[in-house]
Every structure is written in structure tokens, then in C-alpha cells.
Amino acid sequence: MSTSIIEALAFHEAGHAVVALKLDIRLRSVDIMPEEEKGCCRDALQSRTLTADMMSDADWAWARKKALIVLGGEAAERVYLLEECPLLFCSEPDEVELKELCCSAFGDLGPRASQWLKECRDETDRIVEANWKGICSLAELLQSNNHLSGDEAERAIRGRHSIDWD
């Protein structure tokens, strides 16, 4: 696998991780698997069953956090690639997870879900841009260490650069 693909994958996973930390969600681990051309950011956001016609404020808050974390990979990859070429790892699992989330929360993928996702994307873009140095630090470390515990990832992000935690 080329170095640029490994770099893009590292930035993608670092985006998920930094957004999770920004939302006060602890990380379990962050991995890139170059031989499989995939990665994984495991966070401690508890899973939840959503029902479109019974969404509480807590359900909406959870759904928003989940969407922002999922979108973090795409947003970081877009910044890394400077939008000069197609996204490499705007992964199918991320897209499937977003569609399932919208179907659960809204009952369909209609205009309300699309507008909500646009708002989530905009918010995720702001988080990624404000915390780009932390994403870069984690991505750099991931390229030499394919697996990091949540604590190691958090130290990498917080250690070299302060994150805009406001």
C-alpha cells in the first residue's frame, strides 16, 4: 500500500478520534490496518436503540454525537486531501452507519434527515478545522504505530497541541 493511502487512512481515523474527544467521549482504541486498507476508531459512546416516533431529547443528543463522530473521518480526510482528489476512505461502513442512524431517528432518508445531516457535517467541519493540529499529531503517530489504546491516542492529541475544547 502506498504511503499516501496510509496517510489518508491515518487522518481519517484521527478525525473520528478527535471529534469523539471533543464531545467528551472516551476512546477505547484507534487502529489502522494498512494491509486491509481500513481502520477503526472505537469510542465509548454507548449504543442506543432509536425509534423515530419516540425520540427523546437524550436520544437526539446521542444521535447528534454519533453522527459527528462518524463524519469526523470524512471531514479530516477532506482537509488532508485539500479536496484535490476523491476521498479515499469515506468508507462504506461510515455511510451505512449514517443511513441507519437517519432511518432510525427520522423514519426515512427524507428532507428532514438530509438537513440534519448537513447541519452535522457543518458542525463536524468546524470541529476538525479548530482541532487540526491534534488530528495531525495523532495521524503521524498512527502511521508508525498501527494500533493505539484510547489513552495513547488521547495523549498524542493532547500532548503536542492543545485542542480547542470550548
Image: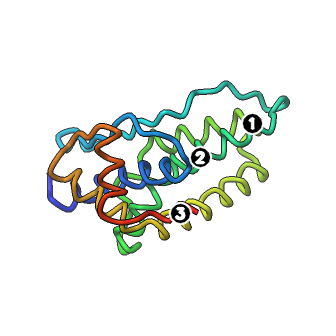
Q: CA distance from mark 2 to mark 3?
A: 13 Å
Callout 3 amino acid: Ile
**Viewer-proximal residue among 149 and 79:** 149
Q: Position of residue 89 (x, y in %)?
A: 36, 52
> Horizontally, is 91 left or right of 113 in the view?
left
Q: CA distance from mark 3 to mark 1?
A: 21 Å
Residue position for label 1? 58
Q: Secondary structure at mark 3?
A: helix
Discs 2, 1 touching: Cβ within 8 Å: no
Label 3 vs 1, first from the N-terminus: 1
Q: Position of residue 91 (x, y in %)?
A: 41, 46
Residue at point 33%, 41% (across, down): 151
Q: How many numbered circles are shown? A: 3
Residue at point 73%, 48% (across, down): 113
Label 2 vs 3, first from the N-terminus: 2
Label 2 vs 1, first from the N-terminus: 1
Dot label at residue 127? 3
